[in-house]
Image (cartoon, grey):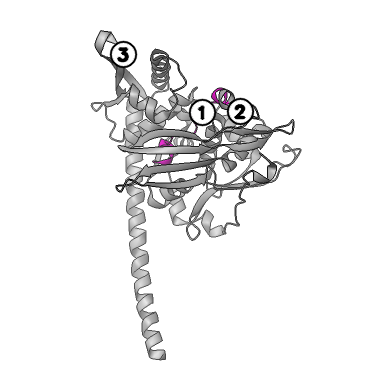
Amino acid sequence: MTKKNLPTRRSVAPVSDVAFTGWQLSLFQGFLANTDDQIESLSNAVDLWDSIPRYSISRARMNTMRTADGFLGVAELSFHYRGRALTARIYPAQIKNDDGQWKSYYPSAREELVEYALRKISAEQGAGFFDQPNYRSGARFSLYQLRKELEQQGHSLRYDQIIEALDILSLSSIEIECATDGGDGAFARSTYFAALSGVKRKDYETHRDSRWMAQFHPLVTQSIDHVTYRQFNYQRMMTCSTQLARWLIGQLVLKYTQAAMLNSFETRYSTIKRDSALLSGYKLDRQAIAALDQAWDELKSLGALSAVKKIEQRGARSKLEDVIYTLHPTQEFVAEQKAANRRQSNAKSRNSNTIEMQRHVEKPHKKYSARAEKQGK
């Protein structure tokens, strides 16, 4: 592959000041909590976007998948979202290494952490933007700010590692396809970060305030517009030691919305394996199930779950066919989900009222304009 055939990064077009202060953005940034410490621990989970297994291919697996020239093909992952079968196709980024050679990378665990950190930064006033006329959203930040956010969450990265992660996010594409009723396939394709702008320097400690901008994936923008995001305990997620534990937390936030002490949640090993794509690297099911059990234990230790009951389903000759997990939440997780429900309900109500008020304001204006035009004739 020659350099002229490599995909190029799109730069973020200028963003107006209004995009950093709009009403829709204020709903995204306004968390429901009792203390400043609680607000600091919160971020937003994005419904469909966070259900896509978009970071599921580890660096170790990539090494086994590359060609002799260092390139990767298109990865195809099948998963379900709200009962509908979807396919994600991931087109890798081509990155020039220190030795001058081009090498392919899929977004993986490091890029996942960087995206979550930037989404957290976008929830701060003056950092996030929602540009309604151009239908885009994102974050304005410095590499120092991003690095400090990651450090505070227990993930220390060098500047060159952060820059490489941003490059991979802005150069990797993801295509989401679903079958239509007519049998055709409808799809949407975009890079993980729709655009990225910044300044590469030799000494970032001296130039801490150099501004970067990342434009989020269109599904994030759509979620902000339609108020389909949910607040969740971001610090707990970032504390998780494995991607699988982070994925489980995210799915519980998005699906276990009616969490209660007397209301358990049931899921299956086969469902988690299919939808997360994080267990396919194990040669044996028992190894994957052991990793899943460890992830459940971590969620218990982090205060999300109080108990996990496990029932093995076996077929002929006692062959293990599936595992059913019944999850019981902690009071802390129940309170978090109830707060998320109230916040989302309030935000949707305020958004609807604002849209209705705008319609009432616009209608007389349109009538007046039509009348004035008629009188002018």
Q: Give how far apart the Cα atoms at labels 1 and 3 are.
A: 26 Å
Q: Give how far apart the Cα atoms at labels 3 and 2 are.
A: 35 Å
Q: Position of residue 267 (x, y in %)?
A: 30, 25
Other residues around mark 2 within 10 Å, as few (<14) / some (14–19) / many (≥20): few
* Rendered position, 28 above or below 370: above
**Identity of the residue drawn at 36% across and 61% down:** 355
Give the residue number, with chain letter if any, for mark 1: 57
Identify which residue, 252 or 48, lies in the foreground.
48
Other residues around mark 3 within 10 Å, as few (<14) / some (14–19) / many (≥20): few
Q: Secondary structure at mark 1?
A: loop
**Residue type at numbered disc 2:** Thr
Give the residue number, with chain letter if any, for mark 2: 67
**Residue type at numbered disc 3:** Leu
Q: Is residue 308 visible?
A: yes
* Rendered position, 374 above or below 357: below
Which residue is situated farthest in the left direction here? 262
Does 149 sit left or right of 349 as displayed? Answer: right
Does 176 sit left or right of 167 as displayed? Answer: left
* Rendered position, 199 above or below 72: below
- Closer to the observer: label 2 or label 1? 2
* Highlighted range, magenta: 47-62
Q: Position of residue 351 (x, y in %)?
A: 36, 55
